[in-house]
Image (tube, rainbow, N blue to C red):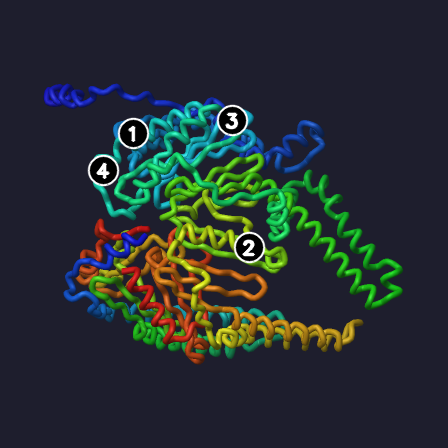
Amino acid sequence: MQASATLNATSATTAAGLAGAVTPLEKMPGQLRFWRGFHALAGLLAGVACGAVLLGWAEELLPGFSGYGAGASVTALAALGLAALGWWYGGRYFAHYQGSLHAGEGVVLRSGVWWRTEAWVPMARLQHLDVTQGPLDRAWGMATLTLNTAGTHDHSLRIKGLPTEQAHALRAALLPRTRSAHE
Amino acid sequence: MSEEAVAAPAAAVPAAQPVAPMLGLHPLSFLFVFAKGFRHVALPLVALVFFGRQTKSWEVFVIVPVLVGMVMAFIRARAFRYQVGEGELVVREGVLDRTLRHIPFGRIQHISQRRQLPHRLLGVTELRLESASGGKAEATMKVLGLKEAQALEALLHDRGAGAADVASPSLASGPAAGVAQGPGAGAAGAPGPVAQAGAAIPGASMAAPDAAGGAAAAAMPQLLHQLSSADLIRVGLASNRGMVLVGLAFGATMQHDTSRKLVLPYLKLPFQWAKSLLVSDWVVAHQWLGATLGVLLVLVLATAALRALSVALAFFKYKGFTLVREGGKLVATFGLSTHVRASARLSRLQRWQIDETLVHRWMGRCKLGVAVAGGSADRGKGLEPGHHLDELAPIATPAQAQALLRMSLPALDWVALQWQPLPRAGLRKLLGQARWLLPGMAVLLGVLWQQQGNVPFALWLALAGLLLAQWLWRGWAWGRFAAYAVAGDVLVYRSGVLHRRWVIVAMPRLQSLRLATSPLDRTLGLCTLQADTQGGSRRQRALDMPAVPLAQAQGLREHLWRRMV
């Protein structure tokens, strides 16, 4: 246990230059578009579903209910309102999403609007790294980098919206070397 | 064609050594493989045999597919083959979907055997070969005869030992295996009732200092901890595993009509007795006093019955518990009918936890549990014990637990720990719970006020007041006790009110860190610090410290980070 600690303390420098230097990772605007669209769609569907359920209840509980036209327009308005809310939330989420590379040490990812988290993953604990691209990612030139450690609960960290070349360069820079400690 | 004919003799030249035979499983393997499926149809089969066509139970129709499954299991067990090759173990299994696996010896870190009562009666054993990363076992052989299992283990030892010299020495703390346990494994050649497990192959790295020292000291096991019968009773009293047994029995009987009809009348007896007690003349005559006493009596008796069950379970699981240190390895043996021998290298221990419930405090004892890297996949479920080391001491006096901790973490000096309290932790907990507790109680009281049943509203109000007072006290007490301490490379976090926990982690063994804040946290200037290690539980993080003041949390995070990178 002690031997591994001292060996890691004398770790080599990385491609980023001085050990300890913090460089923020880029976020592609395609990711902003994706999150905005995703949350807006979620809001829209939620609004429509809620409206449908409420209309169904109204029909059951109030005999002779005939306000379907009014009900439908209210539902549409609510759905649009929720979609706008989702659109705004996607923008806020993108603003708060920031990854950074600590040269020679590891990666930090800050995310979340109201429930904010900072995930710190050291280079010495990385087991393997994956770069994945969905169809939208390919169209907008971005990729997701997944960092896997040996932990059981938080064993993987996904960094989204990286430019494709930077994702590949990061993977090459962070590749676990034989000197890393696993105990 | 001619090129292939020329190439074939050239390729055949390297195979000069004698090729090891392809061996199969024990002839009775199929019994153990479909014993699982058999359990589900056992009762309907019995009903069919004894009651003939009178049972209209639908399970009768399930018998045919299950029988087909049994035949398939038989064929698969017959088709299993394994072979010890050059530096790897070759396993061939499957009938329709054939699989050929090559498992290098360096990957096999842990060989364990488990023998339950049927295994012991038939003289067979279940062998599992596991790798360093945990997860699914590399190869599971159900079942092998005792002699074949020992021969395979010895063979793997020899080949593994040979491979260790030429393998490239990775870091001292790389995913290396344990110490050679040749004398220990070979000596148990006689098929005694004691099962053996946990013989680790010396893997890729012999550079590990404890492996080198351990090889010399392997012949001298040092007894660390042992449980007497009185200790087993204490273990049972302090745990509520009796509920597990009740739950299992309930689940098992509820599955079939026949078992329901047979067992349910007996299960109903305690409830009927309790009901008759509560509506008896004495209780009615004494109104509230009688009712309260009646309920208390029922609760006390129920708790006593459950604890008696827990004591029985403790005997079943922990009989003969011995913790022994062999060089750099800890070996625990325990069990009544299923004898388990679980082992772990000292350097693979990731996280320790001392539990002290109210009953533990009354008895002056505590429990020391441990999480081992690579051990999460096979936790014991219900009554069945797992293959891995879970507890260094199911019960121990605080002094014994401290001694065990000192042995695994020499740098930790418990007495000299500087505990840093967490201000505002109690407040944070209370506010967090108040968000749903107070509205919920208000709604409930409103509903009861509306109902106006035969119970006066004042009584509900008094109960609600008691609940709130208890809730406030618990939050305040939690805030007072929660604290953390840093001693070099070790972080200790304590928390709890009635059930107290001390979580101990070694910083170089942490895998990742996390700082989380909720809106309430940010208002109070707090945050939650979390860390993860190998081998823990999937449902819970290794270290979870809520309500740490922000500045302290960032300082602590920096301290941990320096030791992790």
Instruction: Specify whether residue B302 is in view.
Output: yes
**Distance from the alpha carbon under mark 2 to that under mark 3:** 34 Å
Which quadrant is home to the N terminus of chain B?
Answer: top left
Name which of mark 4 and mark 2 comes first in the sequence. 4
Label for residue B20? none
**Can you identify the residue that label 3 sits on?**
B192
Q: Is residue A44 visible?
A: no
Query: Which residue: 33% across, 57% down?
Result: B508
Chain containing the residue with disc 1: B
User: What kind of element bears circle 3?
Assistant: loop
Return the x and y of residue B481 as percentages of the image width and height: 52, 69
**Callout 3: few (<14), some (14-19), or many (20+) C-alpha neighbours within 10 Å?**
few
Q: Pointer 4: what residue?
A: B167
Q: Which mark is residue B159?
A: 1
Pointer 2: what residue?
B366
C-alpha distance separating marks 2 and 1: 43 Å
